[in-house]
Image: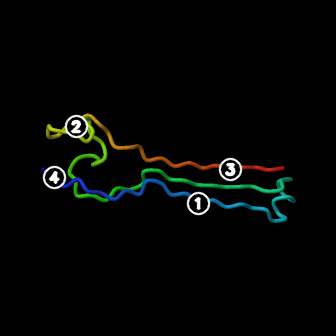
Amino acid sequence: MENAGFVKLREISVGMTFDQPWVSRLLGLSTMNVRVAGRNLRTWTKYTGLDPETNVAGPFEQVGAADYFNLPLTRSFVLTIGLNR
């Protein structure tokens, strides 16, 4: 038996809307939206497996090491730019 308690930073995003005069002057746009997001950035746990959230049997796991073939969720970063005329 092993404690599989965890805290996970699942998603964080930051966005900014630019509607200053320089946007219109330099780009010919009324506004520009920029957003950066990160997903599955960090997991804090004492669990010795890859990820305490992944396993083959779901909540009905009866066999040890059943998460052997599952990989943790993928870390990803997304950049979104919206241009408005």
Give the distance between the C-alpha atoms of the residues marked 1 and 4, in whole angstroms: 36 Å
Give the distance between the C-alpha atoms of the residues marked 4 and 2, in whole angstroms: 15 Å
Marking on residue 68: 2
Residue found 79% across the figure and 56% down from its top: 31
Instruction: Read off the residue under disc 4.
Output: 2
Labels 1 and 2 touching (C-beta < 8 A): no
Nearest to viewer (mark 1 / mark 4): 4
Instruction: Read off the residue under disc 3.
Output: 81
Give the distance between the C-alpha atoms of the residues marked 2 and 3, in whole angstroms: 39 Å
Residue 32 point in image, percent of width and height:
75, 55
Q: Secondary structure at mark 3?
A: strand
Q: Amino acid at mark 4?
A: Glu
Which mark is first along the chain, 4 or 1?
4
Instruction: Read off the residue under disc 1.
Output: 14
- Going by the image, does 45 lie left or right of 79? left
Q: Is residue 16 above or below residue 48?
A: below
Q: Amino acid at mark 3?
A: Ile
Residue 5 point in image, percent of width and height:
26, 56
Q: Is residue 41 above or below residue 69?
A: below
Residue found 30% across the figure and 42% down from its top: 54
Give the distance between the C-alpha atoms of the residues marked 1 and 2, in whole angstroms: 35 Å
Q: Along the line of sight, which residue is nearer the eye, 61 or 17?
A: 61
Q: Secondary structure at mark 4?
A: loop
Which mark is first along the chain, 3 or 2?
2
Q: Amino acid at mark 2?
A: Tyr
Q: Residue furthest left?
A: 1
Labels 1 and 3 touching (C-beta < 8 A): no
Which mark is first along the chain, 4 or 3?
4
Q: Secondary structure at mark 1?
A: strand
Give the distance between the C-alpha atoms of the residues marked 1 and 3, in whole angstroms: 12 Å
Residue found 42% across the figure and 51% down from its top: 40
